[in-house]
Image (spheres, grey):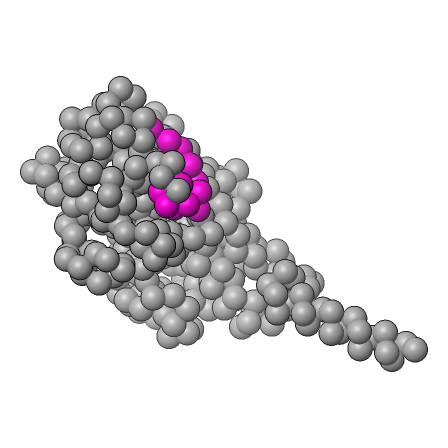
Amino acid sequence: MIGRRSVLVAAATAALVAGGFMVAPAKAGQDILIGGGSVTGVYYQVALNVCNLLNKYSGDKYNCVGRPALGSVFNIRAVKRTLLDFGVAQSDRNFEAFRGQGDWQGKPMEDLRSVFSMHPETVLLVTRADSGINSVPDLKSNTINIGNPGSGQRGNAEDVLRLYGIDKDNDIEPQGLQQQEASRALIDKKIDAFFYTVGNPSAAIEEPANSTDIKIIPINSAEIQSFVDERPYYVMTEIPAGTYKGVDENVETYAVTATVVTSASASEEMVYDLVKTVFENLEELRTTHAAFRVLEPKAMLKGLTAPFHPGAEKYYKERGWK
Ligand code: GLU
């Protein structure tokens, strides 16, 4: 009887695991929590796949969990409060946090520490083909998702609107949905467009692209170009034609870099182990998401504002990269 029961339990467990309903049983090791973004974005993939590598290659030393979170601003704040060990965050938000600007006006986060950079992220403005929106000024009088509070894209949306002379509170109907809801809301015509700052390709744009006809609106006015020129963490770029279904021409916009950050209070050994695991298995990490194919050690040590955490610095020195 016992034998049969174990077989049944094993079969049920296998079914649950296969269905994605169960996480691997917790190991005895130290817990590490990495905060990402929306489930349909790329930050969550960073958190998940970095954790997968650490769990796979660190024996029982760590039990790393990558989880969805609210995005850059939330992650930087949560790292400060040690609610997260690591957070994924945009390079522009790091700059503001460390220097005491934007959401951190007058309150610089001096204990913010850099770990490494990841993939480039573009500032995207996505609408339905039938919305009548063909340029940023056409957003006026429409319902636009500017990003949930705590996200990195919310600041980018506010910058773009301001630089195009659009008053967020009077000229548009702003929404603060999380991205997984915003993608659905665009399909369901509950919103007319959304801003999202994300690595490409992102499921958050593939979803509307595959279920309705979409357009990606260029963000490239002279004001945007000088704004980008004046800031070290921005660069003008293009989303190549064919990245998303129905978008058959290159679309000009600007980009930031996704980064992994922590706090000065994080243990040197933990940060060292995570960094070493990532760089020793970079080939494998590159295969886990299309946005990670471009990852190269040289670029991953650039685009960061806060000083490197000593655990990261130790590894980079050993490799002769610093
Ligand atoms: N850049 C977005 C943010 O900071 C998140 C994008 C993603 O989840 O990939 O909030």
Q: Quadrant of the N terminus?
A: bottom right
Image quadrant of residue 61? bottom right
Q: Is residue 235 magenta?
A: no
The magenta stretch is 174-187
Q: Residue at x 36, y 39 (%)?
A: 189
83 above or below 170?
A: below
Residue 88, visible in the rendered structure:
yes
Q: Residue furthest left?
A: 222
User: Residue 76: image x %, image y %?
Assistant: 43, 41
Residue sitting at the far right: 1
What residue is drawn where x is 49% and y is 45%?
69
Whole-percent x and y of residue 17?
64, 67
Closer to us: 107 or 122: 122
Looking at this rendering, what residue extends furthest in the front direction? 130
- Front-most of residues 246 and 1: 246
What secondary structure predominates along the stretch shown in magenta? helix
